[in-house]
């Protein structure tokens, strides 16, 4: 649909008013929600932190991620750029507290801050401070004012691991501000052909279908030292089910299975998404079998317990190494499915909930035969019992997952080759 200059101005005005309204709403909500409060307060400090870290003569790179998941996607690229540009200062920004709080001390960046709200004033001030030689956005979180400022100054920017859907605002008449912002990227690397086709429909043609960088990221995990002696003591050479990033909707079904269906020789590790004491206590209250908390592991004979509750963060990727079967949370409710590639790379079957339509990798893993979706208690009981009893099926489905990930590696090489960084 064609818009006149006046109509374009109106759409941009509406967008900017929306940003100011969103900022007002966030400030109000911060009074009631600690997570939102962290983001609001962090954004207030962003410019002060940048000014104290950067000097006018610094050469910089800017990486932006919406949250933790996008950071993990971008990490292989970030690490390569860190190595290739050792004299540059790297600025990493997050919009979500769940990304910032976990990775605010990451060694791949010289400074980590919240991205200030996408106002015209903030964008000009931010880009003037950084003057980034290269900007890398991951997947989405497209901010028009920042990107338009980059375009005006003719600075380099790329978007990696992009995944678009036809119903997104970029492809709607009223989405013109966001759609135009995409043209600030000199190149977009998409996860699939559908995304490339959608970009072509808006006349954006500088596109490469490189796949998802997460396949490279999780594959790198196999090269790390994944040994955890306390998990080995707990597992004690028994079959082990690892429940990763679980939410209450997942835990209701899983605790019921553990209490009433699980064979006595099977071990369970529960690593919930929320590790606040109240939530950990809720899991404890549901269990009727011997369990131990990570925080109290040194006071317990781990091999004598059935369930290990991980009430800390940062261990899950290594813990998946000990799984014979994995359950990944988030899809029984509406919160969003967590990373299913992390356990799949270790060659184990994966079980998820029912709401996975917006997760192409889950759809592909299910179609490939290595992942199973359940909708209720009966289905969970059935698939867990089958995988526990049938070693051949466990091995076949696990192999399907590891083979699928190995086949889909390579996005990082394509992106680095485009940037003329050869490793």
Image: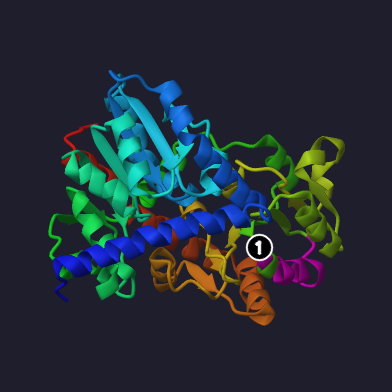
| 125 to the left or right of 375 | left
Q: Residue at x 31, y 61 (%)?
A: 13
Please provide percent x and percent y for residue 195. 25, 65
- State the residue position of label 1: 247
Tell me the crowding category of disc 1: few under 14, some 14 to 19, or many 20 or more residues within 10 angstroms, Cα based: many
Q: Is residue 241 magenta?
A: no
Residue 197 seen from this side: no
Q: Is residue 191 above or below residue 380?
A: above
Q: Nearer the viewer, residue 202 or 14?
A: 14
Residue 199 seen from this side: yes
Q: Is residue 200 above or below residue 297?
A: below
Q: Residue at x 23, y 39 (%)?
A: 416
For this orientation, the residue located farthest to the front is: 6
* Local SS, label 1: loop
Please provide percent x and percent y for residue 105. 52, 30
Q: Which residues are magenta?
A: 250-264
| 221 to the left or right of 278 | left
Please provide percent x and percent y for residue 64. 38, 43
Q: Main secondary structure of the magenta part?
A: helix
Q: Residue at x 42, y 55 (%)?
A: 402
Please provide percent x and percent y for residue 151. 19, 45
Q: Residue at x 57, y 65 (%)?
A: 335
On-image quarter of the N terminus: bottom left
Q: Is residue 66 above or below residue 385?
A: above
Q: Is residue 255 magenta?
A: yes
On-image quarter of the C terminus: top left
| 129 to the left or right of 268 | left
């Amino acid at each position: 649909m064609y818009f006149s200059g006046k109509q374009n101005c109106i759409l941009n005005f509406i967008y900017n008013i929306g940003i100011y309204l969103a900022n007002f709403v966030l400030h109000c909500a911060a009074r009631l929600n600690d997570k939102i409060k962290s983001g609001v307060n962090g954004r207030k400090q962003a410019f002060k932190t940048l000014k104290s870290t950067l000097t006018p003569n610094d050469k910089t790179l800017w990486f932006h991620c919406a949250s933790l998941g996008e950071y993990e996607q971008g990490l292989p690229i970030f690490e390569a750029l860190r190595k290739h540009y050792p004299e540059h200062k790297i600025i990493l920004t997050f919009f979500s507290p769940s990304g910032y709080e976990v990775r605010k001390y990451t060694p791949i960046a010289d400074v980590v801050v919240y991205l200030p709200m996408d106002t015209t004033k903030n964008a000009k001030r931010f880009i003037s401070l950084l003057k980034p030689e290269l900007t890398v956005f991951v997947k989405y979180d497209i901010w028009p004012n920042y990107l338009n400022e980059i375009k005006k100054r003719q600075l380099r920017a790329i978007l990696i691991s992009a995944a678009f859907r036809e119903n997104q605002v970029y492809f709607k008449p009223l989405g013109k501000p966001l759609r135009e912002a995409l043209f600030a990227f000199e190149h977009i690397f998409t996860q699939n052909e559908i995304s490339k086709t959608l970009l072509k429909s808006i006349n954006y043609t500088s596109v490469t279908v490189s796949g998802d960088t997460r396949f490279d990221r999780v594959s790198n995990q196999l090269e790390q030292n994944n040994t955890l002696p306390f998990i080995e003591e707990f597992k004690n050479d028994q079959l082990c089910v690892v429940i990763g990033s679980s939410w209450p909707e997942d835990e209701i079904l899983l605790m019921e299975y553990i209490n009433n269906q699980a064979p006595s020789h099977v071990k369970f590790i529960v690593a919930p998404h929320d590790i606040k004491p109240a939530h950990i206590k809720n899991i404890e209250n549901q269990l009727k079998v011997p369990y131990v908390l990570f925080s109290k592991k040194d006071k317990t004979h781990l091999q004598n317990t059935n369930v290990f509750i991980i009430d800390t963060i940062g261990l899950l990727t290594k813990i998946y190494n000990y799984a014979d079967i994995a359950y990944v949370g988030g899809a029984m409710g509406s919160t969003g499915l967590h990373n299913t590639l992390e356990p799949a790379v270790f060659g184990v079957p994966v079980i998820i909930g029912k709401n996975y339509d917006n997760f192409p990798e889950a759809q592909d893993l299910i179609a490939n035969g290595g992942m199973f979706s359940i909708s209720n208690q009966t289905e969970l009981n059935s698939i867990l019992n089958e995988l526990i009893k049938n070693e051949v099926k466990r091995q076949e489905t696990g192999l399907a997952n590891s083979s699928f990930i190995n086949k889909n590696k390579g996005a990082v090489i394509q992106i680095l080759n485009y940037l003329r960084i050869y490793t």
